[in-house]
């Protein structure tokens, strides 16, 4: 049995996956290879590209180490590593969509994904349509003869609806379309998209894999059928990531299991506590039994991460801003998955289907690794300010 075998526990695998220390004189970590040029021993090898590494954009021992670790976690045939989570969304969409194709995108998608679809995909002649995150098997009614891709994200950005991914995958495949999933929330530790019928699994590795709010990176993992086309597009576009960032994410993976475990426990504790606070109408966290999609989440996911939203009881932007401005430990800033707690106002004005209604303004919370009692006290300050 190898040290990254699927039969081992997840933290053992995270500690040992990717590189083999014996390949580099026993050093535990792989080298950070800064490279454009790779030398060839002779012209014939060069002409036939007859060696493993050929040019910096096409992979190095550093990118291979991370890609191989991610393949192990995802159960994928291959993984590309790109410079941001947003690039991990746009590159596969460009790889599989052409002028005249139709794409179905979940309405509760990460906003920049929508922006990419509404601007670049439309300009390239792709017919973009948004669907209800609760469509499930009903997605079949929206699939057209030219539907090439069904894009999913579950749980949803900001509102955390859970999608019935296996049902969507069955309907899409029956019609000859492929399924992509932005799985950043769960990481492959808590949901393995390819096991549920997804063809392409997308991650903003910027979040939990990097874990320290200092690196941008994306990974895209494909099953065997989609790998060649994904990889060819990646080479064609030349959108490779810098070696230091790739290395940092591999380093982050080593501790991702223990960090996620802590994020999960703290977020659940705080989410449950918030449900009992005056001033909170609802907590949108799929691992809470009160969440409308809890049963679906429980069926498919094996854990929850540290980000969820609250709906304030009544009020509008004034109360939302009062809540945010009163916070002293939670920072006001975008992104999540790092060690520090963050809060952002939620804007749903771009949605066409999944718009609510909600009882008041929404605030998204990323629960970091601070002590839970301190975070609760901070949130109580926010709620008092919103009520005042
Ligand atoms: C669900 C989701 N996907 C993708 C991204 C994009 O990641 P990045 O910030 O690395 O571009 C984000 C960032 O917030 C996200 O929340």
Image (cartoon, rainbow, N blue to C red):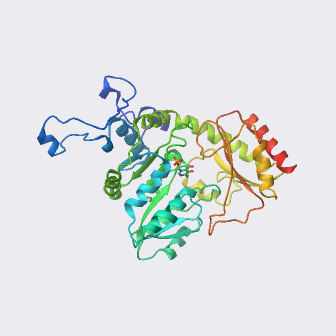
* Residue 170 shows in the view: no
Q: Position of residue 350 (x, y in %)?
A: 62, 64
Which quarter of the figure has residue 109? Answer: bottom right
* Residue 347 shows in the view: yes
* 19 w.r.t. 171: above or below: above
Which quarter of the figure has residue 282? Answer: bottom right
- The number of numbered discs placed on residues in the rendered structure image is 0
What residue appears at the point 58 percent right and 39 percent down from the top-left corner? 260
Query: In the image, is 44 to the left or to the right of 30?
Result: left
43, 110: nearer the viewer: 43
354, 347: nearer the viewer: 347
What residue appears at the point 58 percent right and 58 percent down from the top-left corner? 111
268, 101: nearer the viewer: 101
Quarter containing the N terminus: top left
Q: Position of residue 240 (x, y in %)?
A: 38, 45
333, 311: nearer the viewer: 333
* 313 w.r.t. 328: above or below: below
* 170 w.r.t. 160: above or below: below
Query: In the image, is 275 to the left or to the right of 87?
Result: right
Q: Position of residue 15 (x, y in %)?
A: 45, 32
What residue appears at the point 82 percent right and 49 percent down from the top-left corner? 386
What residue appears at the point 77 percent right and 50 percent down from the top-left corner? 321
Q: Position of residue 167 (x, y in %)?
A: 50, 66
Residue furthest right as drawn: 388
* 71 w.r.t. 312: above or below: above
């Amino acid at each position: 049995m190898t040290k990254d075998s699927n039969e081992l526990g997840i933290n053992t695998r995270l500690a040992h996956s990717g590189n083999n220390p014996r390949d580099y004189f026993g050093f535990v970590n792989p080298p950070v290879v800064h490279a454009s040029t790779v030398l060839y021993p002779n012209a014939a090898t060069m002409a036939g590209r007859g060696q493993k590494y050929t040019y910096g954009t096409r992979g190095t021992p550093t990118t291979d180490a991370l890609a191989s670790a991610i393949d192990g976690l995802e159960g994928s045939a291959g993984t590309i590593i790109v410079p941001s989570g947003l690039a991990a969304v746009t590159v596969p969409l460009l790889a599989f969509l052409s002028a005249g194709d139709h794409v179905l995108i979940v309405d509760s998608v990460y906003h920049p994904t929508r922006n990419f679809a509404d601007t670049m995909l439309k300009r390239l002649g792709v017919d973009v349509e948004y669907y209800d995150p609760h469509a499930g098997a009903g997605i079949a009614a929206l699939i057209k003869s030219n539907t090439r891709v069904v894009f999913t994200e579950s749980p949803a950005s900001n509102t955390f609806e859970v999608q019935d991914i296996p049902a969507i995958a069955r309907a899409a495949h029956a019609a000859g379309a492929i399924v992509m999933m932005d799985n950043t929330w769960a990481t492959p530790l808590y949901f393995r998209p390819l096991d549920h019928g997804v063809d392409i699994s997308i991650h903003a590795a910027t979040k939990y894999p990097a874990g320290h709010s200092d690196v941008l990176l994306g990974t895209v993992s494909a099953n065997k059928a989609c790998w060649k086309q994904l990889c060819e597009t990646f080479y064609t576009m030349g959108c490779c990531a810098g070696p230091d960032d790739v290395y940092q994410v591999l380093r982050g993976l080593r501790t991702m299991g223990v960090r996620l475990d802590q994020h999960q426990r703290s977020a659940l504790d705080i989410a449950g506590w918030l449900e009992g606070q005056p001033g909170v109408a609802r907590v949108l966290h799929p691992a809470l039994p009160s969440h409308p999609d809890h049963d679906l989440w429980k069926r498919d996911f094996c854990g929850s991460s540290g980000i969820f939203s609250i709906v304030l009881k009544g009020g509008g932007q004034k109360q939302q801003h009062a809540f945010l401005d009163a916070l002293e430990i939670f920072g006001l800033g975008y992104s999540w998955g790092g060690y520090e707690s963050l809060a952002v106002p939620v804007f749903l004005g771009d949605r066409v289907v999944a718009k609510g209604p909600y009882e008041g303004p929404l605030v998204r919370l990323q629960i970091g690794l601070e002590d839970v009692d301190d975070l609760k006290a901070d949130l109580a300050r926010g709620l008092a300010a919103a009520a005042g």
